[in-house]
Amino acid sequence: MHGASPPARTSRVAAARRSRVREGLPFPLGAVWDGIGVNFAIFSARATKVELCLFDEAGQKELERVELPEYTDEVWHGYLPDARPGLTYGYRVHGPYEPKAGNRFNPNKLLLDPYAKQIIGELKWDPAVFGYTIGAPDADLSFDTRDSARFVPKCRVIDPAFTWGRARRPEVPWERTILYEMHLRGYTKLHPAVEERNRGTFSGLLHHEVVEYIRDLGATSIELLPIHAFVDDSYLVDKKLRNYWGYNTIGFFAPQPRYMATPFVNEFKEMVAHLHDMGLELILDVVYNHTAEGNELGPTLSFKGIDNASYYRLAPDPRYYINDTGTGNTLNLSNQRVLQMVADSLRYWAQEMRVDGFRFDLATILAREPYGFDEGGGFLDACRQDPVLSSVKLIAEPWDLGPGGYQVGHFSPGWAEWNDRFRDTVRAYWKGDAGKVGDLAARLTASADLFNRRGRKPYACVNFITAHDGFTLNDLVSYNDKHNEANGEDNRDGHSQNLSWNCGTEGPTDDQAVIALRFRQMRNLLATLLFSQGTPMILAGDEFARTQNGNNNAYAQDNEISWVDWQAIGPNETALIDFVRRITAIRRQQPVLRRSRFLTGTYDQRLKVKDVAWLAPNGREMTPEQWRDPNARCLGAMLDGRAQSTGIRKRGIDTSLLLILNAHHDVVEFRLVGAYGGRGWKLLVDTNATDTTVKPFFRFNSVYQVAGRSLALFEFARGRRRP
């Protein structure tokens, strides 16, 4: 067992301050200013002493250490009546250094408060930030006595007061939600309308021109990649790269310092207020499955030094960590206090910061108990019963690297889930792969085979073609292979099976025929996404063919590879933006595209209709043989607006639509089937058409020439009802 004692403090000023320390309260956790002083409270079940370390405003010089005087219900706490917002601090936690027993206390290491509302400074990688001595035999069992304070970020007490004014939450219904996934920094880093000092920050995203563009595009909800405080991995820093995506959290209550243009966390609230005023929701991508401290060879920055055995899932040999995340460690949500921290963090962002929902990275881990995944596990139950968390949007990434990690469709009611089956099926279909029409039909109808259970709704299925991880939409149709050389891993990183097709030429080309095909394929993919049941998610920049030059794993590229290039928007890109605006408007205007009930294709005896009929090119319903035909590459879906959309039969009927998807390389003659008491079909979208102003009319049973690799959408034209 090792330990260390702080240097003696003899100044009368320090002694006077210590004499004013009061017992304080064990709740709430964190550093909380009550208008008079600051209460400090930190959980540790195994510590023997906790010292509060106070620093100068810049966080450079340690001014004094104050021992927290009380220990209640495993919470160390104290109250400083003369402390104010702006105070910079950290902790030193004493206890046994017994790695073989899972304890890694080392008071030589300055630690971040897990509940810190603001973090200042950046981690400087130095041997002193490790609890052990690098290079020693059985290194992680050794004990390092160097002081890490000069090299680690610090915490700052905040004043949470903020005037929200007239801003109201948009409260967009799930069935009307269109998600727009973006990286906060990359989205405005090159934006010409944003002031240089605000680019890449919360202030940049609240710029009116930026927000207006997103709203006019048709998105309802911005989904931001992680903005919680995170650190850059040492191996990336060595290669002069950064952890750009931010899936390396070290503070679950604090915004990332590099995303702030001002010294005040209320900058985030100003951004939220402006988004809400423009009718846009904000969803945060959050990472509660692991932290930046890595495994037994990682640094000691916060949780590891506060109570390693409580915060992390340890292996049967507690010297080591369970690594279901692939990042070295896994948070232990089976511990009540760790679960409380995550729930407190979520409530803080939902209530105090007013975000509208969360997307949970590797969410299967959050629902995994020691015995495995459990949709009734502690974390999911905590969210479901919580009056705050149950009222915001909750989106799971339903997979991880652990045992039984793939759980698409298995989360409990109240959750939505990313659906990678939609991504893979739609990519393969438009690539021209054989035998995909049956699976395509399931994906177009919100994957009822996965989600239609326990009263869940179609919007629980979050459909996407692309996301931050993988090819952009442009690169999906421009590259057969990944090109990740800039990551410094000899192109070994990233997925190799992308279901992409370069349309005949790898990468950029001047061949106009190839360019035209690529843009048509992008329109096909976007239209399939927006015209499918479920909740669509668009990757920011896909609407104007943003490229990452074939890099499908740009997690470390905080540069022009990842930043959105607004200057690259030419005539073709502008036309694609207009197309996206048009198809999002069609989705808003056509209720049949966003049903609150799963489409089943069964015949309703009372209404004498099918909610969806699957059609072959001859206009007749698909036969079993046609479903099984591996060469079938053209499918029609007639969505009947007369079908009952809720449990209450309404008087009016919605407009019916006919959707045709032709992945064949050649023209397919498709007979436009007759329908109830109407005049015919009006063409709304043809991804092969260049003139978007004309909406031709076609009589029932006429034949429409569906161009090769194109999609068409028709609207039912009503006429006088038949007797």
Image (spheres, helix red, strand yellow):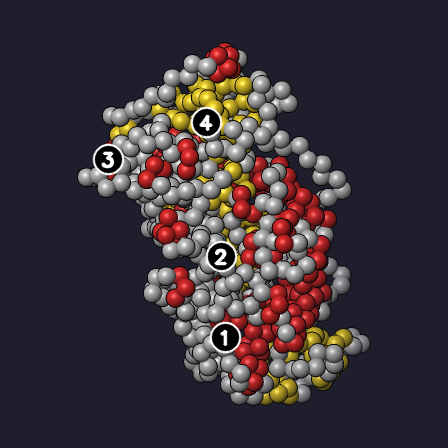
Name the residue carrying label 4: 62
Name the residue carrying label 2: 558
Q: Residue at the spot x=60%, y=60% of the render?
A: 190
Is the Cβ of the residue at disc 4 closer than 8 Å to that at disc 3?
Answer: no
Q: Which mark is residue 477?
A: 1
Report the residue that reaches farthest toward the left. Answer: 137
Quarter placement of the C terminus: bottom right
Report the residue that reaches farthest toward the right. Answer: 720
- Mark-to-mark CA distance, 4 and 2: 32 Å
Determine the image quadrant of residue 694.
bottom right
Of circles 4 and 2, which is in front?
4
Q: Earlier in the sequence, mark 4 or mark 3?
A: 4
The x, y position of residue 535, in whole percent, is 58, 59
- Mark-to-mark CA distance, 4 and 1: 55 Å
Q: Earlier in the sequence, mark 3 or mark 2?
A: 3
- The local crowd at label 3, few if under 14, some if 14 to 19, many if 20 or more residues have their Cα within 10 Å, is some
Name the residue carrying label 3: 141
Tell whether 160 sits left or right of 93. Answer: right
Helix, strand or loop for disc 1? loop
Helix, strand or loop for disc 3? helix
Tell whether 293 sits left or right of 389. Answer: left
